[in-house]
Amino acid sequence: MSRLLLTQRLLHIPFKQVFVHATASRKCTETLLVIAKTARGLMGVGEGCPRSYVTGETLETVHAFFESQFRSWEEWRGVEDLRGWMVAHHTLINSNPAAWCAGELALLDVWAKESNQTIEGLLGLTELDRTFRYSAVLGAENMVAFQSQVRQFSKRGFTDFKVKISGRRDEDRAKIHCLQEMGLENLRIRLDANNLWNRVDEATSYLQALDYPFWAIEEPLQRGDYAGCREIISRLGCPIILDESFLRQEHFDMVNTDPNKWILNLRISKMGGILRSLAVARQAKDLGIPLIIGAQVGETSILTRAALCVANQCRDILIAQEGAFGTYLLERDLTDSPLMFGEGGFLDPAPIIGLPGLGIATNSLGM
């Protein structure tokens, strides 16, 4: 394959509404784009979303990582060079997963286009062939905004909801009652506390007071408090979803003795790209740990497409999927045909099936 030219840019797209949770609020994207171009004009685009409260990365660190590494990447001729570098620089990627994710996606996208293959074909994976179904994700906004979101999702036929709680008991109770009052059949609610509490007693008493049979709770305690989470599981009788507490394969060491207690929220940018995400998904399957394929708030269609690649390989352990908000949340996307969920939360990949690379045609607005 031909020599590449790699460039980067930071992407800021305003949100149509502020997205709030217990540890952050966002009004626009904070994204690194990496663009890979060949001599004959083919282009691949990769995306990474640094989050200081998840991986410790910032827009400044992802920029610096790219500047320090990209010249060696331009010499690579294909996937085997990329894999070899990943093995040799495993610890470096651990500290810069979102930055590496953007680079990896750009390279895989352009190499697949150069060989006229889908990204699945390039990697020897099962091709996309079926729809994907997404959960509604409700932030910790004020009740007027929350009720408006619930009505919109309910009209679209959603029954699976992830609710980000605030720690304000009356407000969080009102959110749950709002969902119950919609009269939805087969209503499923899981909570995301975003590391809200420091103590087990405080977390369990609060969650019990909400008086609802949540099917799972995400990150109730401080990141990495596996022992505390085990105590919450024993008291409440529902599994814990690990997100900020599960960033790389080594974290299986913390959960492999009791896999039935856990669910992993696998976000492509957080994990460090497609290949590292696939490795986590394979090990989760071997251990019998279910997966949620998650998303960073503000992802464009590039990361939505990358997540489909991973979700498609692990459908047998996939219990929920998040993201695909596209221009429901963003003022614009990188493409004129954003990948977004539709009625009932379903996303039909038919428009991109068989297209080379990620299959995303970037527009002049985004690029």
Image (cartoon, grey):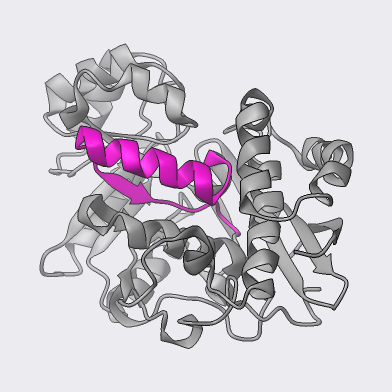
Q: Position of residue 192 (x, y in %)?
A: 37, 41
Q: Nearer the viewer, residue 129 or 269?
A: 129
Say which quarter of the image contains residue 261: top left
Q: Nearer the viewer, residue 360 or 195?
A: 360
For image coordinates 25% across by 41% down, the residue present is 285
Is 204 placed above or below 316 here? above
Quarter holding the C terminus is bottom right
For image coordinates 69% across by 73% down, the residue present is 114
Q: Position of residue 281 (x, y in %)?
A: 36, 44
Determine if residue 195 is in view.
Answer: no
Asked if residue 141 is among those painted magenta in the image, a careful observer would answer no
Is 364 placed above or below 314 here? below
Q: Position of residue 262 (x, y in %)?
A: 25, 32
Is 343 placed above or below 249 here? below
The answer to whether 116 appears left or right of 188 in the picture is: right
The answer to whether 302 appears left or right of 10 in the picture is: left
Task: Tell me which segment is drawn in magenta.
Answer: 271-298
Say which quarter of the image contains residue 362: bottom right
Determine if residue 181 is in view.
Answer: yes
Quarter holding the N terminus is bottom right
Is 265 placed above or below 116 here? above
For image coordinates 79% across by 62% down, the residue present is 35
Q: Position of residue 70 (x, y in %)?
A: 84, 45
Q: Nearer the viewer, residue 200 or 242?
A: 242
